[in-house]
Amino acid sequence: MDTPMGSMHSKKEQTHSIDGQGSNSQDSVNGEGEEPASQLLDPPNGGLTAWLQVLGSFCLYFNTWGIVNTYGEYQTFYQTGFLSSQSFSSISWIGSIQAFLLFLVSTAAGPIYDAGYLRSLLWVGTFLSVGGMMITSVCKAYWQVFIAQGLVIGVGFGCLFLPSAVITSQYFTTRKSFAQGIASLGSSLGGVIYPIIFSNLQRLVGFGWATRVIAFIMLGTSVVSLAVMKQRFQAPTRRALLDFGAFRDTPYLLFSLGLVFGFMAIYVVFFYVQLYAIQVCGTNTNLAFYMLAIINAGSTFGRLIPNFYADKTGPLNMQIVFAFVASLLTLCLIGIRNTSGLIVFCALYGFFTGTFVSLPGPTTASLSSDLSTLGTRMGMALSSAGFGLLIGSPIAGVILLDARSWVGLQLWSGALLAISGSCMLAARIVKVGTKVKVKA
């Protein structure tokens, strides 16, 4: 699953240049490509260097959320392969802890980034994520996979995700949302390409080399980010990890609670759709492996189109509608028993759940009266959402194992999305009242 932290720094922030790793200088940035301090105050809003940051960010999204969105492939392989003795829930914990650490570590990485240590985050994140994939390729036991693919890669992703989400804000003003939108498409493209690579290579050369090929692709694309990404300035103050005033902001709390329930729900389908295709819909195994790619392709449009109209309707209004529609779609899955119906479902599901990645940032901004605390509030919201993602799919695995029926799993996911939409609707009512034609 890209995200929603692109507006982490306030437009009103004063800037300090960076020399090396965190030292202040009046006339240079990182000791290279010197730029007068007066120019640092005004982002270029374009130009070669600025668009290279978008390219670097695109590659980071490609290698973080693109891989997270690929875990459904591994879930199905492990369940039918060398981890078949493990329960659905146990295998889900691997992908869940990976995504949870992406959220958690990225929040902790915020102050490190603010201090000027962009390149340190990139180097450490690349080493852990690529190294973790290489180690995963030789794993033979559950505990080995859990440590390598869950813990090591998850920490690496956390180091890489934060820079990918905030770097464009230092280079763009009026085109900031557009630039960040292009960068975030890397997660959708990765979620399409990586599952196809794994499913095809796994049959041809086996699990080990299929995973190693993915690791080499991650390494090659990460080199692009290391080569082009350059932090323009250092924040004047360290960003706090907690904004205690947010605990008294009812609309914000209700929206954050909605994110928790939403992230508990949406990855249930990502993790189990291929197994459902094989066991329930009778889908050919080769075609079943493309279901995850179809969801990720649909999410590409679900991140661009709703965001475009959200500027007019309000991001919270748009998120509420899409959460309820996603809930209805998930409940409709109960009646889908054929391949063609499942393909249509996957495309629509990807579209309507894409807003859970693209809209939390704008929505948090719309609910925050003080934009100087936006980064902290976004980090708090995503950390809580990470806990939802952590437990949602493993609980679904327990439901599937105990009930021996897919209906319980579908009801679980659909109900959680309905609760998510209800929490967001309550946030809107508290914020602007019950009038329909009010932007929120």
Image (cartoon, helix red, strand yellow):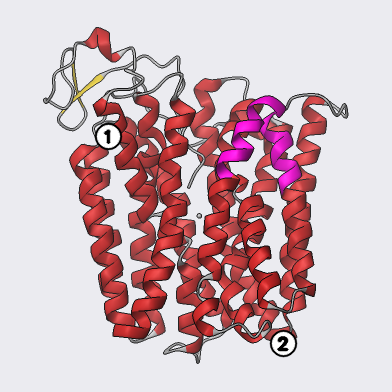
The image position of residue 38, as x and y in percent, is 26, 7
The quarter holding residue 400 reads bottom right
Query: Alpha-carbon distance for marks 2 and 1?
Result: 50 Å
> Residue 321 in magenta?
yes
Extent of the magenta region: 303-322
| Residue situated furthest right in the rendering | 434
The image position of residue 100, as x and y in percent, is 49, 57
Q: How packed is label 1: few (under 14 Cα within 10 Å), some, or many (20 or more)?
A: some
In the image: residue 80, left or right of residue 138: right
- Residue 144 in view: no
Q: Which residue is mark 1?
A: 52
Looking at the image, residue 220 lies above or below residue 339: above
Query: Is 242 in front, or is 298?
Result: 298
| Residue situated furthest top in the rendering | 38
> Residue 409 in magenta?
no
- Residue 181 in view: yes
Query: Is 134 in front, or is 286?
Result: 286
Looking at the image, residue 337 lies above or below residue 16: below
Which amino acid type is marked by label 2?
Arg
Q: Quadrant of the C terminus?
A: top right
Q: Which residue is mark 2?
A: 404
Which amino acid type is marked by label 1?
Leu
Mark positioned earlier in the residue sequence (2 or 1): 1
